[in-house]
Amino acid sequence: MCSNGAVPESALSVTDYVRTTRGTDSSAGFSHGNTLPAACLPHGFNLLTPVTDARTRKWLYQWNPPGGLRLQALAFSHQPSPWIGDRAGLQLMPWTGHAHTDPKRRAIAFSHDDEHARAHHYRVALADGTVAEVTPTDHAAAFRCTFTTDEACGVLLDLPGDGWLRADLLPDGRAVITGRLEPSPGFGRRQRDPVGFCYGETRQRVRVLANPHQGLLGRRPARGRRQAVVLELPPDQGDQLEVLLATSFISVDQARHSLALEIGEADFDQVRLRAQHAWEQVLGRLELPEATGEQRIIAWSNLTRLHTWPNAMHENAGTAEEPRWVHASPFQPIGARARLRQRPTHTASPVLPGRLFVNHGYWDTYRTCWPAFHLLSPESAGDLLDGILPAFTESGWMGRWSAPGHVDSMVGTSSDVIFADASAHGIDFDELTAYASAVRNASCPPPDATVGRKGIGGGRFRGWISSETREGFSWSIENAVCDAALARWSDRLAGRADELGVPEQADGFRANAAWFTNRALGIRQLFDGRTGFLRGRRADGRWSRTEFNPLDWGGDYTETTGWGMSVSLPQDGALLAALHGGEWALADHLDRLFTTPEDADRPGHYRRVIHEMREAQAVGLGQCAPSNQPAHHIPFMPLHVGRPAQSQRVVRDALTRLFTGSEVGRGYPGDEDNGELSAWWLWAAMGLYPLAPGSGEYVLGAPLTPMTWRRDEGNLTIRTTGTGAYLASVTRNGEPWPAVAIGVAELRGEVELCFELSEHATEWGVDSRPGSLSTSELGRSWGPWRTDRSWSALWSGAPTAALERLVDNTGSHPVHLVAGTVLRARWQQPWRPRLLTLTAQNPLRPAVRARNSAAEQRWRELELRGGQAQWPRQTVAWLLPDDTELDELEVRLPTDGTLFQLEVY
């Protein structure tokens, strides 16, 4: 019988274990998280943070800042990452004696011992005796400053960027603050970020002082406007000053409305208790009956990070009882007329109905965060998924990064995998719209660098993204991961077409399943048998570098090396083993990967040592650097070669060694981007991991501590017997489970997984393997990998130069053909094609005939089963009849058309 044993030692609230300062001992040179000590609501609109550098949009708070630990402000922030930067900030700072807008002159020293940094409340006692604190609502915040001085005192509000602030006195002496917060130039983003606005009130009577010296504020504000407001607390008002502030991306009036809805007459402590309750609802889903104090701090702090992003950008224009959600769109351009008509207190951006979630890097989070939402909180996951879809419905594309609009950052259209994974989990969301977004990513060249797959114009025909595209190899790998997820998703949709009310699309789903499977299997073209590594290729097929060293960073690889990307087929370990020559060869490669040291001395194309190199070296796991996203899966890859004990040893080492240091502002081995490292720890600690998101499967490991995840559909309980880092056996609801992987269906409802632990390696799971696309039923149905044979045929029916352009695998040369044109291909030997793809400027469905000239004289009309183009230059796949053996093929155009590529598989 499996038992959890001991009861919790402490009766503290789960929120008391959270430390939002974990990971803040970081800089551009070395990251222990690069986090922000944010107080907010789960997936909240605003982040509230202490600021140790009020003139930057990057590292707002550092555990050990240059020049000593000094508070320069408490601030509203919308920063998803220091690398992306902040926007629409608003700062508040208590002062005594004299108010200064110069951050260095107004800074006040404090000690970390005097900080209380929780998800729902930040409080700090400053060296001058002032206590400053803030607590959040969704769109607003309550600030409270308690003074212990006989000198003049109050608060200063200012902006870290452009804009203006204004303070007016009400008849009762309280102040009203209004302002406009201009967006900041961002990291690779389109300049469509909506302007921010603020509205606030003081609880006490105050004096509005003359605008102080502007210090380092930079550009002067517009005439009659201020970038700073100074409020003084009169002696007869006591020693506390409360300021209530709300922000909006729509208008000052909407900010006022949000403040009334979310705070109203509530005092600071009431607001704090509401925020605490909101987090207790989320954090209380995880129960840790036997965890140590440190494990509880890590677990609940990580769960807080997971549920901080993505951030809401919608606002309630209705009432609490009947909300009406609207948002200022960061995806649609602001017309010149709108800019001319814009008012200083209202956005010129389109204000559209519906919810919107932003501030998320999908490459960062698809591996760990979204599977966690899907399995552990499926009740709310659908809202998040539907909330990121406006990016597609409003702009025509999902972004790779959202901050809040599309940002040119990282590789892969990873929202494809996120949506496919949600489908595998049975999440209720707008699945068909999400599927359309993924198909467009995979089949169409993007309009600019902020969306879509770079290099896909030719890469979709060639089979890889060439090294002429920056980080082309990493693009190829991520595309293969996305295409494998899309293949499985398409296959599921084909079986559910009637249920979804789109029976007419079933054949299109089936054709896409075949096409995406073939594309995913085509990653084999990047394996170099001579070196034993996956490598980048040029457009002409040559390897990208004549001198190859897998220790070199950058170039073909995003934030890693040839070693770091050498086992980056988590969706198809069987294919990877076959490329190496067998599981024994891949096992040997993994042994060398874990033991080859990272010396951080070969920056390669980066030309300098970057922080990821130093962190990979500090991890001390050879060339496995789970400090960064490209290596998150590597500790679990030994499962693909029958070595579960090796995986269990590496994972336990990472769990217990790399996530410590909460008390000194550390806690993560590298950048903790939007909760992805937090989710990695949570997965590994529970003994599950989504090795191939989108596959509907998890791999099993040795849990760190027993836990229960409370879900509406039924609890998922992790129990253990024995001790150690290795697995001796596993049961599911009392029945033995010998496999190293378990499906989503087996984790739904009320489930208890009991893990028998061992201090020594065992033989459990050595005969089992995680699923692989190439050996799955889908892979066997459409595999093995097939090459496009259009280029090897003798074509006729159009000028030779035009025909060559149609089969040149670039997709960049338009060929204009009139209605009735017949393109005829002839091969030397009969063969059985399975797929035909056509890339045209506009939707085009050809008529196709075929024959085997050695066996028949008459042409046979072939029924094409597939989809319909939705966008310009989209590649559309059609299934050919299974029994078609041919050496001649005719493709007839029903209308005039502009073609870019024709393929036959």
Image (tube, grey):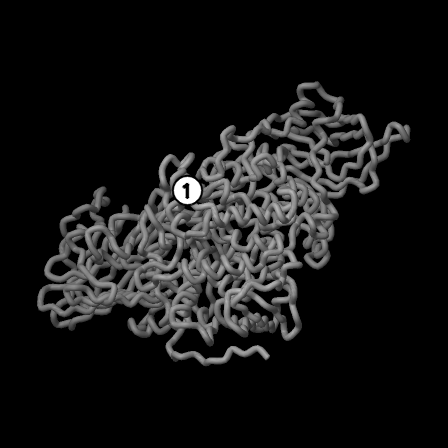
Q: Nearer the viewer, residue 380 or 610?
A: 610
Looking at the rendered structure, the number of numbered marks drawn on it comes to: 1
Tell me if I can see residue 393 in this picture: no
Residue located farthest toward the left when viewing the structure as drawn? 150
- Specify the quadrant of the image occupied by residue 318: bottom left
Say few, some or many: other residues with alpha carbon within 10 Å of mark 1 (under 14 / 14 to 19 / 20 or more). Answer: many
- Specify the quadrant of the image occupied by residue 455: top right
Q: Nearer the viewer, residue 71 or 292?
A: 292
Percent coordinates x, y for residue 697 in the rendering: 62, 59
Apparent side of residue 775 relative to residue 633 in the rendered image (left or right) = right
Residue drawn where x is 55% and y is 48% of the image: 590
**Which quadrant would the C terminus be assigned to in this image?**
top right
Residue drawn where x is 73% and y is 45% of the image: 782
Q: Nearer the viewer, residue 743 or 797?
A: 743
Residue located farthest toward the front when viewing the structure as drawn? 760
Q: Is residue 522 above or below residue 744?
A: above
Tell me if I can see residue 575 in this picture: yes
Residue drawn where x is 64% and y is 34% of the image: 842
Percent coordinates x, y for residue 135 in the rendering: 32, 66
Percent coordinates x, y for residue 314 in the rendering: 44, 57
Apparent side of residue 329 relative to residue 878 in the rendered image (left or right) = left
Which residue has dot 1 on it?
Answer: 189
Q: Is residue 846 above or below residue 254?
A: above
Percent coordinates x, y for residue 576 in the rendering: 62, 45
Task: Look at label 1 and name its amino acid.
Answer: Arg
Apparent side of residue 270 relative to residue 900 in the rendered image (left or right) = left
Q: Is label 1 in a helix, a strand or a loop?
A: loop
**Which quadrant would the N terminus be assigned to in this image?**
bottom right
